[in-house]
Image (cartoon, rainbow, N blue to C red):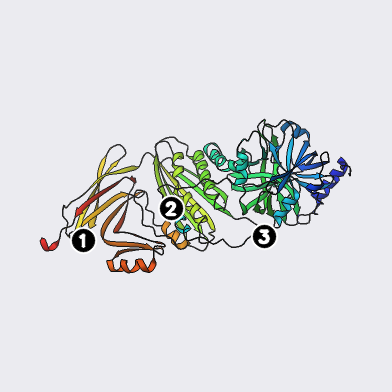
Amino acid sequence: MNPAPSRSLRLLLLAAILAAPIGAAAKEEIITVGELRPGMKGYGLTVFEGTEPEHFDVEVVSVVPNFLLRQSIILIRVDHPVTDHSGIIGGMSGSPIYIEGRLAGALAYGWRFHKDPIAGVTPIENMLAVLERKVRTGREPVLPMRLARAMEPLLRDEASHGALPAGPFFESFSRHEDASILPARTPMTLSGFAGKAMSMLEEALSPFGIDPVMGGGSASSAEDPGRFVPGGALGVQLVRGDMNATGIGTVTTVRGDDVLAFGHPMMNMGQGALPVTTARIHTVIASVNRSNKLGSPMSPIGSLVQDRQACIAARTDRTAPMIPVTFHIEDPRSRFEESYSVEIVSHRLLTARILHAVLVNIIQNAASDATDVTAQIEGVMKISGRDPITLHDAGVSRRGLTPLAAYFRPSGIVSAVLSNPFEDADIESLEFDVTLRYGLEQSTIVGAFLTAENPLPGEVVNLNVRVRSYGGEESLFTVPIEFPEASGGDKVSITVGGGDAVSPVMPVPRNLDDMLANVRRFYPPKSIVVVTEVPGEGLSLRGRVLERLPDFAVSALKPAVGDQGMSSHKTSVRKVYPTSHVMVGKQTVSVTVGSREYR
């Protein structure tokens, strides 16, 4: 066996790697699992502080065959003053391991509460196999039965953001954590987050082996290496701007525009597009449980393209989309105003959850008052190639603004748009204006009655709506009701409710435009909606709502269209009346319409 390279030789090799221009890194000679034997020595590269990789000594302990499906693991003992004290460190994931001068793989696994610095290495041949996967273009076909499900978040009274699903890869390590070997978890450096928002991100990301840790925002460009090198720090960015969330690991190898890192998945989501950055490591935070690097992102210089069992793969010649998001919060009474700007990764599973956490974080910072508050949100979502979509929401709370964030409907709408089954939707920007009024500007609909007991067909009769505001003061809200000529002798039902209490009629969408049209059908929370049922049947089909259809038309359409994408409902006349308060509650009045020939 060849002796391990001397320290001076290793430094020369490192200097040569750092001096090589990006895109022109030499392909290291590799050593396969079959060539490894216990006792073989080598070294690894990682950043313990700053931006330049340091070497640490390693010795092969053993090879565990078929540790994961068709993937062995190389066990090594690490020798370095930092690891002697801290053990295997979160953020070392991806550190290249060289045995007798040849690349064996990436440090990727460790134990909790470990006493010895033993690590698991993902073989380089498994990582290189990820580069062989072709990046898919276009979208997979969608079954018709999924069309209705695409609108589910928009049909609920509350926005449903959904939990991020933990992939089978990480589920296999979630049980008996104390005794099992685990991926060397990726520290997610958070800057500008605190309290509830940080807990939300931790809850969403921990199933993926990601540990949210407090860190810094973007580091000084003067320290930025401006390129990826083996052993250098690499960040995968989810949020940047006034807040920052970046998962930090280590580069294993650079081959032209291809970069392999981590030695295990970040979230095991397969093909994707997330911004990757260079990073600076401030220090290592030692812990008996699990140590982590504390770092800050630097320049974005590429995009993640694969997130697989063996590693993540990035390309430096690609750019991942980010969604600019601006928040403006205003309290007119105290003349308080504040604006925030961030960019959030565009991803169908991640964006809505991150947007939700960002909103909660902004609220905690700008409006943490735990008192009676009424909030109104006006938002604008710009989708490439389409007219802007206006997003409305409003609510009241006895405990301040933070609890209202759980019902932030625009987050659910953003999620539904990004995950729609019709086409790729590029959200160009999101803007939200939040107006606060301290006090409960909410009224409850507690009763309703007509001013005539037996109205005639074609007659206009007033509906008096009894409304009780917070504090017990009652008032009448009067709206005119016209009874159709065809309603004579029929029993007519009239429902009156707050904007959030009345569900709009929504046809099953055939395309993204139909889906966006359904978004516009929501009623403002600061409104009273009056629904008057009239004789006849209505149909929702092919993205449209058809009202007041004669019986023969309904009978003809049903067989022609079938039941796919079609639903029937009672025909109704709906009118919306704006109010100054958030309206809640619902009342129904029934009346029998007289017949003119008997009057």
First in sequence: mark 2 or mark 1? 2
Q: Name the residue under label 2.
A: 154
Residue 129, located in which quarter of the rendered image? bottom right
Looking at the image, the residue that sits furthest to the left is 599
Name the foreground residue: 564 vs 64: 64
Kindly check if marks 2 and 3 are in contact, taking CB atoms under 8 A apart as contact: no
- Relative placement, left or right, of 45 versus 202 is right
Q: Note whether 531 is above or below 223 in the view shown.
A: below
Residue visible at 67% across and 31% down in the picture: 113
Residue visible at 52% across and 41% down in the picture: 361
Name the foreground residue: 261 vs 574: 261
Q: Name the residue under label 3.
A: 134
Question: Callout 3: helix, strand or loop?
Answer: loop
Percent coordinates x, y for residue 526 in the rendering: 35, 49
Q: How far apart are marks 2 and 3 (CA)?
A: 35 Å
Q: Mark 1 points at which residue?
A: 487
Kindly check if marks 2 and 1 are in contact, taking CB atoms under 8 A apart as contact: no
Name the foreground residue: 285 vs 125: 125
- Relative placement, left or right, of 5 versus 242 is right
Type of the residue with mark 1: Ser
Percent coordinates x, y for residue 297 in the rendering: 66, 45
